[in-house]
Image (cartoon, grey):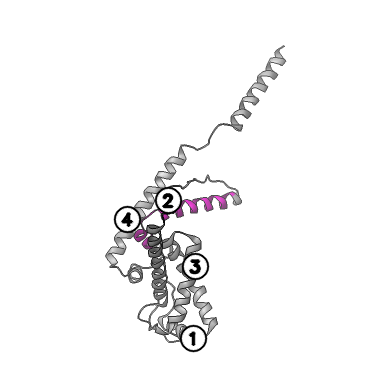
Amino acid sequence: MIPSSATTPATGQPHGEDQELARRIAAGDRSAFELLIRRNNRRLYRLARAALRDDAEAEDALQEAYLSAYRAIGEFRGDAALATWLSRLVLNQCLGRLRRHARREKVIPMVASSGDDAMEHDYPAPDDDAPDRAFARTELRGLIERQLDRLPKTFRLVFVMREVEEMSVEETAQCLDIPEATVRSRHFRARSLLREALAREIDLAGRDLYEFGGVRCDRIVQGVMARLDRESAGKA
């Protein structure tokens, strides 16, 4: 039985278990390291994705952070939750990548932007058919992700931590090394900006509801004319 007296907010794992897991990894226990990865993968990927706005970059950054964690796990002392310690490593990895990208862009002008200025937005229409509902959810999720990617990084990270991963204000502040009051204000601002952006997209999509034209227009015209022809033939 692993002794413990406190529990981490995000993962529900006791601090004592964190230290035992770290000890096993430091001793070369690969199964313990795999457990650590699987336990934190989704949360840490979301943080990396929020910071970098690119799926492949986020995966690469996460792998690098895990390797750094494996090499430095002996330094973990349990002052913070293991999940918080890992989050800081991931964010440091992401910030390093962003700084390198910024330096490269100063030397070599980038032809393509991050995609902020060339995004398409679709609003899914509800339907009772299960496959269509799944498709609609995918489209809606894509819309939300695109709008989230357009938020400033400082707001984006706080939003993902608080809303997506349901991290506490305290833990979010620890991960980002900012005051709790700043977490609250950025979270509020991020929600407001995202809500406004989504409202604009819905307004634009509403103008195209039940779009009429093309094949549908031709079909109705042909149907009406055919009925007129039949009525005229019946009167003759």
Q: Amino acid at mark 4?
A: Arg
Question: Could you tell me residue 56's position as x and y percent?
Answer: 51, 62
Element at label 2: loop
Mark positioned earlier in the residue sequence (2 or 1): 1
Mark positioned earlier in the residue sequence (1 or 3): 1
Q: Which residue is mark 2?
A: 116
* Residue 155 on the magenta segment: yes
Element at label 1: helix
Q: Which residue is mark 3?
A: 60
Residue positioned 68% across, 18% down in the render: 229
Front disc: 1 or 3: 3
Element at label 3: helix
Q: Which residues are magenta?
A: 132-159
C-alpha separation, residue under disc 1 versus residue under disc 3: 25 Å
Q: Which residue is mark 4?
A: 189
Mark positioned earlier in the residue sequence (3 or 2): 3
Asked whether the beta carbons under mark 3 and mark 2 sit within 8 Å of each other, the answer is no
Location of residue 200 by image quarter: top left
Asked whether the beta carbons under mark 1 and mark 3 sit within 8 Å of each other, the answer is no
Classify 10 Å Cα crowding around label 4: few (below 14), some (14-19), many (20 and above).
some
C-alpha separation, residue under disc 2 versus residue under disc 1: 44 Å
Q: Which residue is mark 1?
A: 24
Q: Amino acid at mark 1?
A: Arg
Asked whether the beta carbons under mark 4 and mark 1 sit within 8 Å of each other, the answer is no
C-alpha separation, residue under disc 3 versus residue under disc 2: 22 Å
Task: Count up the numbered dots.
Answer: 4
In the depicted structure, whether residue 86 falls above or below residue 197: below
C-alpha separation, residue under disc 4 versus residue under disc 2: 19 Å
* Residue 144 on the magenta segment: yes
Mark positioned earlier in the residue sequence (4 or 1): 1
In the depicted structure, whether residue 143 falls above or below residue 26: above
Classify 10 Å Cα crowding around label 3: few (below 14), some (14-19), many (20 and above).
some
